[in-house]
Amino acid sequence: MNSLPSRVFETAVNELAKLPGIGRKTALRMALHLLKSRKEDAESFGMAIIRMHNEIRYCRECGNISDNELCSICGSPKREKSIVCVVEDIRDVIAIENTGQYNGVYHVLGGIISPMEGIGPNDLNISGLVVKVESGSVAEIILALPTTIEGDTTNFYIYKKLHASTIPVTTIARGISVGDELEHTDEVTLGRSIINRTPYENTILKKNQ
């Protein structure tokens, strides 16, 4: 695409094009929309992004995004604190919450093991999960990671790390297609997968048969 008539406008387009899933043509349309909008609306949009970057914190208990030291989930007296759902990132927390079928808390790993991308166990928040289990406050661990090779590898690594404990380790039912990300799964299917979770050991036995 040829360079644009304004360097300021082109800079805005280039920055928008850095967003995931946004190509240059889409970024151009977005920039034009913002340019045509009221000044107050554009300023409000910009300030929302700046405030998000400067003010959002990460929950000290689970790693979810929060406005405070504890997120609204960990801070709620209505949540079952002894049931911990392990997820890859914040998108999965949002996806599971949207089902309305889960009343426990979460543990956000911040990624999954992926040698191809140079991500190992030490790059993830796995040690924090082990500490939670060793504290004696956890009654069940639910592994809700992507149904990919990387997700399965991470599941197995966590299972081995927690194997010495006596608490049950379960995994979401395979109503989710292999290779799918949780955020792309419809709410009904994801909700049923949470409800119909199975012992993780069963998945290992099936793979070895």
Image (cartoon, rainbow, N blue to C red):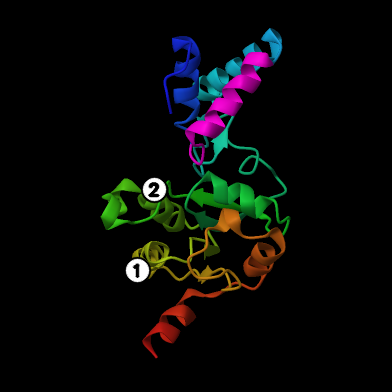
Query: Residue shown at 26%/50% (left/top)?
Result: 118
Residue 55, relative to residue 19: is it above or below?
above
Identified by mark 1, the residue type is: Lys
User: Magenta stretch containing residue 32, yes or no?
Assistant: yes
Report crowding for label 1: few under 14, some 14 to 19, many 20 or more residues within 10 A (C-alpha).
few
- Residue interval drawn in magenta: 20-36
Q: Earlier in the sequence, mark 2 or mark 1?
A: 2
Question: Can I make out residue 83 in this image?
Answer: no
Residue 112 in the image, given as x and y percentages of width and height: 39, 54
Q: Is residue 109 found left or right of 183 in the rendered image?
A: left
Q: Give the distance between the C-alpha atoms of the residues marked 2 and 1, in whole angstroms.
A: 15 Å
Observer-nearest residue: 97 or 106?
A: 97
Residue 89, relative to residue 159: is it above or below?
above
Residue that numbered label 1 is attached to: 160
Residue 113, relative to residue 35: is it above or below?
below
Query: Residue shown at 63%/69% (left/top)?
Result: 193
Give the main secondary structure, helix, strand or loop, of the magenta stretch.
Answer: helix
Residue 19, relative to residue 151: is it above or below?
above
Query: Residue shown at 70%/45% (left/top)?
Result: 77
Residue 189 in the image, given as x and y percentages of width and height: 67, 66
Residue that numbered label 2 is attached to: 125
Q: Image quadrant of residue 33?
A: top right
